[in-house]
Image (spheres, rainbow, N blue to C red):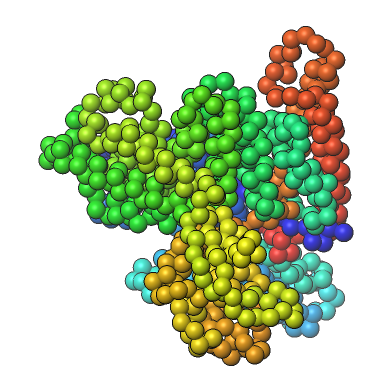
C-alpha cells in the first residue's frame, strides 16, 4: 500500500551569535567573522560579516528544503581576509540522527577544529569475497556517491589496501574524471591463507588468521596542484564480516582520516549559539490526504472563517509563520489563495479598531500575504530591483548622511545627493512596475483595499496604507535591505554597501507609509533627511497611481483596440477564418468582443506573446498570443500597434509561472508547423522566446507534501486542539467572562468551530495510524548495509 511513500526533509534555524573567538595574531586582534551553513560540504547559507568583533552577533534566520540525503548539518565560522583566502576558525557539525535532540532549543556548541582530513562526505559500495578454492580474497570496488567537489572539480580514484599484523598490500583504481559519483567496477585480489578453523583442508603455506585482517579503502582527488592529491575520505572493513558465507556486500559512509588534523584545545576556539528546527515528512499517495485536504481547501467558504481548518491551524501553532508556509503553498497549488486570503483579511479588518494599526501585527493574514509575495512575486522583484541593486553594490558610492558616522574624506552634500538619486530611481521603478505585478498579487491587493475602505469609510487614506504597508514595508523594503535573502545578490553586501541599502530601505518605507501626521515629526527627528524627501502631495500622487496599478481597477482597460483575429477553432469542424473584433486588455484578462464578450483569456494563461512570420497567412503585422492548448493569431492595424500590443501583453504576463522558453514563429497549417516542419501540434517550440520568464522559473509545489506538513503541525499541537475544543464547550455553556487559559483563541462561533475541530482530530488520527503502520513495516524490511541504511 505504501510503496510510493516519499521521504522529504526540511530545515530551518537561527544563527544567533558566537563568543570567545580566538583573537587575530597581530596588533589588531579583532576579526571580521561570518558563518556558513553547510549540508556536509555544500554551503547553503551565509550570514553577514560582523566586523571587528570576537563575539559577533548574527541573529539571522534561514530556511531550506533538503533535496538529498546528508550526514551532517555543519556551521563554519570564517575570518574574512581581504588579501588572502578567508580562513576557517572552527565548526559545529551535528549528525543527522542527533538533530532532534536540539529541535527548537537555543543551544551553545563548542567550536571544533577544521582539518582537510576531517572534512569528508559521501559513501562507497564494496563487495568482498573469500574464495573456497584458492586462497584469495577478492575485493570488488563498485561505486561511490556524493563525493565532495574540491576547488571546483572532482577526479576521484581509490586506494585499496589489505592490512594485517605483518602485511600491507596496496592497489589503486583508475582515475574517474569530472564526477563525484564515480562508477569503478574494478576487482582486486589479495592472497591470504586460512587457519584450520575455517576448513579441514590443510595448506602447505604458513597459516594466516583472516579475522585479524582488514580492508582499507581511501578515496582521493587526483589534483594537478603541486601540493599533491586531496584526501576525500576512507573506510576500514575487518574481514571477519565475511563470516562462514565468505561474502559481504554493503554501502559504507566515508570516514575522516585517523589522527588527521592538528591538536587544538576545543575551548580555545570559542562557541556558537544556534536554534535548529529539523523535520522529516513521510509523504503517502494522494488519496490518503483527501479528508484533511478537503477540509483545508474549503476554509474560504466557512462562515465565520475563524471556524475554518486553515484558520484553526494558525491559532494552535506557536508561530504564525510555520502555519503560513504550507497553507500558502497548498492554496497556491490548487488556485484558491485569493479567496482564502480575502476571507481571513476581511475578518481581521473587521476586528481592527484603529485604522493606523491595520495589518501591522504578525497575524496569520500578514504572514500568508508575505509568503504569497515571496513565492508569486520573486521574479517580479528581480525584474524590478535587481539591475539597480547590482549597480549600487558595484559602484560603492557613499550615501552616509549621519554627521557622526561621516568619514573625513566624505562630503555630506555629495552623500545626500547620492542617496536622493538612488531613492528617486528605486521609487520610480517601483511605482511604474504595476503592469508587471503578478495577477495573484493584484487580486489580493484589490481585496485588501475594498475591505479597508468598507470598514473605515471616514478615513480616506486607509485604502492606500492597507496596501502600501505590504508593497513597501513588507516586500520591496526588505528586499532592498537584504538582497541576498531574495536572490538579488549571491551573498551579503559589504558593510559600507549594506549601510547604503539600509538608508534607502528606510527611506522607501517612510515614503510608502507617509502620512501628514508623520511627515513633520520624522523630518524633525532626523534633521539630515529633509532634502531627500519629496512632498506629501507628491508622494500621495505616486501612491494613487501605484496602488491603482497594483489593485487592478479592472473597469479601466489598459488597452482597447479594433483588430483582426483568426478564429481559434475551438470546435473541431469550426471555420478558421479572419474576423474583425474589439480587443480589450486589463491586468486581469485579455478579451475580444463583437457586441458582447466572445472570449476571455485570463492573464495567467498567457504563456508567450511573439510575432508571427508573414509567410504563415501572407499577412503583415501579425502576432500570436500562446495559450496552453492553442494560439490566438491577431493582425494589428500597423507595425507600431503590433509592437505596442506585444510589449504590453508581455509585461502583464511576464511573471506568469509557466512562461515558455521556446515558441513556433510560424503557424501550424496543413498538419505541420511551417517553421520546423514537425507534424505534432504539441511539439515544443523551435525558436527561443524574446521575453518573459525562463521555463525553469516556476512555482514547484507538491500539494500532498504540503498537506503532510500541515498534518505534522496538527499532530505536534494536538494538545492545543483538545484545549481549543474545551474552550468551545466552555464558551457555549457559560455566559460569563472567558476563562484566562482559553483567551488566546479566536472563537467567533463555538459550535461551528467545535464541529471543524472534531473533523480535524479525526483526519489527523487516521493519518497517524497510517504512519505507525508504515514505520512498523519499514523496520521489518530494513537491511543494514543497503544503499539507504548505510554502514558507518
Residue at the spot x=26%, y=22% of the render?
A: 524
- The answer to whether 711 appears left or right of 657 in the picture is right
Q: How far from the left and from the top, in percent, is residue 32?
A: 32, 42
Extreme residue in the top direction: 736
Q: How far from the left and from the top, in percent, is residue 14?
A: 52, 38
Q: How far from the left and from the top, in percent, is residue 787?
A: 70, 64
Q: How many marks?
A: 0
Residue at the spot x=61%, y=59% of the render?
A: 602
- The answer to whether 159 appears left or right of 419 in the picture is right
Q: Is residue 162 visible?
A: no
Q: Please, is residue 102 above or below residue 790 in the view?
A: above
| Rendered-image quadrant of the N terminus | bottom right
Task: Say which of 536 and 513 sits in front.
Answer: 536
Task: Say which of 437 and 507 sits in front.
Answer: 437
Task: Say which of 710 and 57 sits in front.
Answer: 710
Q: Is residue 397 visible?
A: yes
Q: Quadrant of residue 51?
A: top left
| Rendered-image quadrant of the C terminus | bottom right
Residue at the spot x=74%, y=53% of the render?
A: 704
- The answer to whether 48 appears left or right of 775 in the picture is left
Amino acid at each position: 500500500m505504501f510503496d510510493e511513500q516519499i521521504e522529504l526533509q526540511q530545515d530551518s534555524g537561527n544563527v544567533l551569535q558566537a563568543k570567545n573567538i580566538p583573537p587575530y595574531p597581530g596588533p589588531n586582534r579583532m576579526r571580521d567573522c561570518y558563518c556558513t551553513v553547510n549540508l556536509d560540504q555544500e554551503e547553503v547559507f551565509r550570514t553577514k560579516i560582523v566586523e571587528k568583533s570576537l563575539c559577533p552577533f548574527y541573529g539571522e534566520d534561514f530556511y531550506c528544503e533538503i533535496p538529498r540525503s546528508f550526514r551532517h548539518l555543519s556551521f563554519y565560522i570564517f575570518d574574512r581576509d581581504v588579501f588572502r583566502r578567508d580562513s576557517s576558525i572552527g565548526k559545529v557539525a551535528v549528525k543527522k540522527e542527533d538533530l532532534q535532540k536540539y529541535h527548537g532549543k537555543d543551544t551553545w556548541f563548542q567550536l571544533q577544529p577544521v582539518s582537510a582530513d576531517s572534512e569528508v562526505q559521501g559513501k562507497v559500495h564494496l563487495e568482498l569475497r573469500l574464495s573456497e578454492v584458492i586462497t584469495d580474497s577478492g575485493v570488488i570496488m563498485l561505486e561511490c556517491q556524493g563525493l565532495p567537489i574540491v576547488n571546483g572539480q572532482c577526479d576521484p580514484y581509490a586506494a585499496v589496501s589489505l592490512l594485517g599484523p605483518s602485511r600491507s598490500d596496496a592497489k589503486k583504481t583508475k582515475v574517474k574524471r569530472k564526477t563525484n559519483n564515480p562508477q569503478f567496477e574494478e576487482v582486486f585480489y589479495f592472497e591470504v591463507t586460512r587457519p584450520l578453523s575455517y576448513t579441514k583442508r590443510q595448506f602447505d603455506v604458513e597459516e594466516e588468521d583472516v579475522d585479524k585482517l582488514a580492508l582499507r579503502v581511501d578515496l582521493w582527488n587526483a589534483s594537478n596542484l603541486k601540493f599533491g592529491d586531496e584526501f576525500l575520505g576512507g573506510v576500514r572493513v575487518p574481514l571477519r564480516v565475511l563470516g562462514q558465507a565468505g561474502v559481504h556486500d554493503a554501502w559504507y559512509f566515508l570516514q575522516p582520516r585517523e589522527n588527521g588534523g592538528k591538536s587544538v584545545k576545543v575551548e580555545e576556539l570559542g562557541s556558537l549559539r544556534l536554534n535548529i528546527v529539523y523535520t522529516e515528512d513521510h509523504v503517502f499517495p494522494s488519496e490518503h490526504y483527501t479528508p484533511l485536504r478537503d477540509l483545508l481547501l474549503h476554509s474560504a467558504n466557512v462562515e465565520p472563517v475563524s471556524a475554518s481548518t486553515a484558520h484553526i491551524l494558525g491559532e494552535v501553532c506557536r508561530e504564525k509563520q510555520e502555519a503560513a508556509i504550507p497553507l500558502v503553498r497548498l492554496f497556491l497549488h490548487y488556485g484558491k489563495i485569493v479567496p482564502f486570503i480575502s476571507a481571513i483579511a476581511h475578518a481581521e479588518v473587521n476586528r481592527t479598531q484603529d485604522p493606523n494599526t491595520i495589518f501591522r501585527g504578525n497575524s496569520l493574514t500578514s504572514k500568508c500575504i508575505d509568503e504569497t509575495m515571496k513565492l508569486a512575486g520573486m521574479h517580479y522583484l528581480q525584474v524590478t530591483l535587481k539591475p539597480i541593486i547590482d549597480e549600487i553594490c558595484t559602484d560603492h558610492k557613499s550615501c552616509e548622511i549621519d554627521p557622526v558616522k561621516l568619514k573625513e574624506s566624505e562630503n555630506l552634500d555629495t552623500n545626500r545627493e547620492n542617496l536622493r538619486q538612488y531613492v528617486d530611481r528605486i521609487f520610480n521603478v517601483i511605482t511604474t512596475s504595476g503592469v508587471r505585478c503578478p495577477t495573484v498579487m493584484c487580486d489580493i491587493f484589490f481585496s485588501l483595499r475594498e475591505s479597508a475602505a468598507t470598514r473605515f469609510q471616514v478615513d480616506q487614506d486607509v485604502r492606500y496604507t492597507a496596501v502600501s504597508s505590504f508593497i513597501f514595508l513588507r516586500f520591496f523594503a526588505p528586499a532592498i535591505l537584504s538582497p541576498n535573502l531574495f536572490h538579488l545578490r549571491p551573498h551579503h553586501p559589504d558593510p559600507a554597501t549594506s549601510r547604503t541599502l539600509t538608508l534607502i530601505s528606510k527611506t522607501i518605507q517612510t515614503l510608502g507609509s507617509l502620512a501628514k501626521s508623520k511627515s513633520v515629526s520624522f523630518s524633525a527627528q532626523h534633521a539630515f533627511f529633509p532634502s531627500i524627501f519629496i512632498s506629501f502631495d507628491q508622494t500621495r500622487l505616486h501612491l494613487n497611481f501605484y496602488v491603482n496599478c497594483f489593485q487592478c481597477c479592472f473597469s479601466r482597460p489598459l488597452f482597447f483596440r479594433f483588430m483582426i483575429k483568426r478564429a481559434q477553432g475551438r470546435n473541431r469542424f469550426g471555420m478558421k477564418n479572419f474576423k474583425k473584433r474589439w480587443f480589450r486588455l486589463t491586468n486581469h484578462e485579455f478579451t475580444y468582443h463583437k457586441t458582447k464578450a466572445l472570449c476571455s483569456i485570463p492573464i495567467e494563461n498567457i504563456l508567450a506573446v511573439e510575432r508571427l512570420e508573414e509567410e504563415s497567412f501572407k499577412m503583415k503585422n501579425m502576432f500570436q498570443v500562446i495559450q496552453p492548448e492553442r494560439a490566438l493569431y491577431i493582425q494589428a492595424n500597423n507595425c507600431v500597434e503590433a509592437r505596442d500590443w506585444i510589449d504590453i501583453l508581455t509585461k502583464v504576463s511576464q511573471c506568469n509561472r509557466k512562461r515558455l522558453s521556446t515558441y513556433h514563429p510560424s503557424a501550424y497549417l496543413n498538419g505541420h508547423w511551417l517553421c520546423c516542419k514537425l507534424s505534432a501540434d504539441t511539439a515544443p517550440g523551435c525558436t527561443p522566446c524574446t521575453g518573459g520568464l525562463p521555463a525553469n522559473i516556476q512555482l514547484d509545489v507538491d500539494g500532498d507534501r504540503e498537506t503532510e506538513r500541515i498534518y505534522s503541525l496538527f499532530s505536534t499541537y494536538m494538545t492545543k486542539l483538545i484545549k481549543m475544543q474545551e474552550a468551545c464547550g466552555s464558551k457555549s455553556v457559560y455566559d460569563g467572562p472567558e476563562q484566562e487559559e482559553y483567551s488566546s483563541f479566536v472563537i467567533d462561533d463555538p459550535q461551528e468551530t467545535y464541529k471543524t475541530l472534531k473533523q480535524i482530530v479525526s483526519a489527523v488520527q487516521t493519518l497517524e495510524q497510517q504512519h505507525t503502520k508504515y514505520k512498523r513495516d519499514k523496520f521489518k524490511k530494513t537491511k543494514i548495509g543497503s544503499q539507504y541504511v548505510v554502514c558507518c
